Amino acid sequence: MFPVATLIEDKIQKGQLTQFLANNGGSTCADKERVIDVISGGIHLEDEFNKGNSVYRLDSKRPRRNPSPVISFSDADYADGVVPGHVDALVITTKIGTNVVKKILIDNGSSVDILYQNAYARMDLGDRKMTIAKGSPLYGFTGNEVRVIGVIDLPVLFGSPPHQVWQMTKFHVINASCSYNAILGRTTLSALRAVTSIPHLKMKFPTEYGVGEVKGDQ
């Protein structure tokens, strides 16, 4: 049995995952991308689940010649229009597969990555299929139980060329009301080795070519 990361790399070499790879001349998915806008209504649930998720990095397999870069924040990192002293959540827009998805919450308090069914139903997923979930349900702060409809592995883009990476993320699809389309939790943030700053509404992470960053949508 080959490791999943090895199988992914083999597919990349065979040209089977080109739609998910960065292209400095522009996205290879530009003609197919679908925009998923905000889901209105509902409340935010911070879900807790087991940590058995698998996240696979789709960047280069070449050995790193230099140690990971130092990640820091300064006043120069304040995103456009961000007023110091706010208490807003870090919410981003990025690609999940060929879909441009808005209202993705970066949540250090969630141990699982969530994709809400309303967003899932509107996404172009090609031949990717959701599988039936096995295991425990999710629980929020109030102790309410949320059943997982299924799980699906989808690539998520972070950063911009040349400081960008795709992460293959295991999303747990749930049917619940929420003002977000998806939640990225500790599993993905840990695999990405990301550092977040709420005052700056920004997330930074190491890449093969230096520090990548994602700005929040205030």
Image: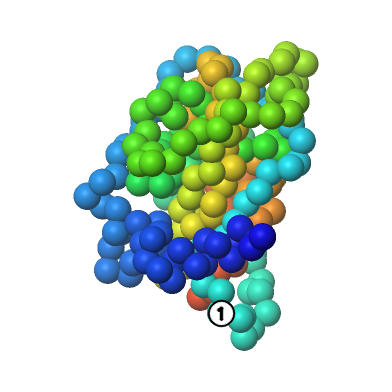
Q: Please state, as top left, top right, bottom left or bottom right, where the N terminus lies in the image.
A: bottom right
Q: Is residue 198 left or right of residue 127?
A: right
Residue 36 in picture, x, y percent from top left: 36, 33
Tag 1: residue type? Arg
Q: Is residue 48 above or below residue 100?
A: above
Q: Is residue 77 left or right of residue 189?
A: left
Q: Residue sitting at 62 percent across and 24 percent down?
A: 148
| Label 1 secondary element | loop
Disc tally is 1
State the colouring used for the structure image: rainbow
Q: Residue sitting at 29 percent across and 59 percent down?
A: 28
Q: Is residue 16 visible?
A: yes
Residue 208 in picture, x, y percent from top left: 54, 74
Q: Residue sitting at 56 percent across and 79 percent down?
A: 62
Q: Is residue 169 above or below residue 102?
A: below
Residue 49 in picture, x, y percent from top left: 74, 32
The single residue placed furthest to the left in the displayed view is 31
Question: Which is nearer the eye, 212 or 145?
Answer: 145
Quadrant position of residue 47? top right
Q: Is residue 3 left or right of residue 49?
A: left
Quadrant position of residue 26? bottom left
Q: Residue sitting at 62 percent across and 85 percent down?
A: 65
Residue 59 in picture, x, y percent from top left: 51, 67
Question: Which residue matches tag 1?
Answer: 62
Q: Dot 1, crowdedness within 10 Å: few (<14), some or many (≥20)? A: few
Q: Is residue 99 visible?
A: no
Q: Is residue 114 above or below residue 73?
A: above
The single residue placed furthest to the front in the displayed view is 1
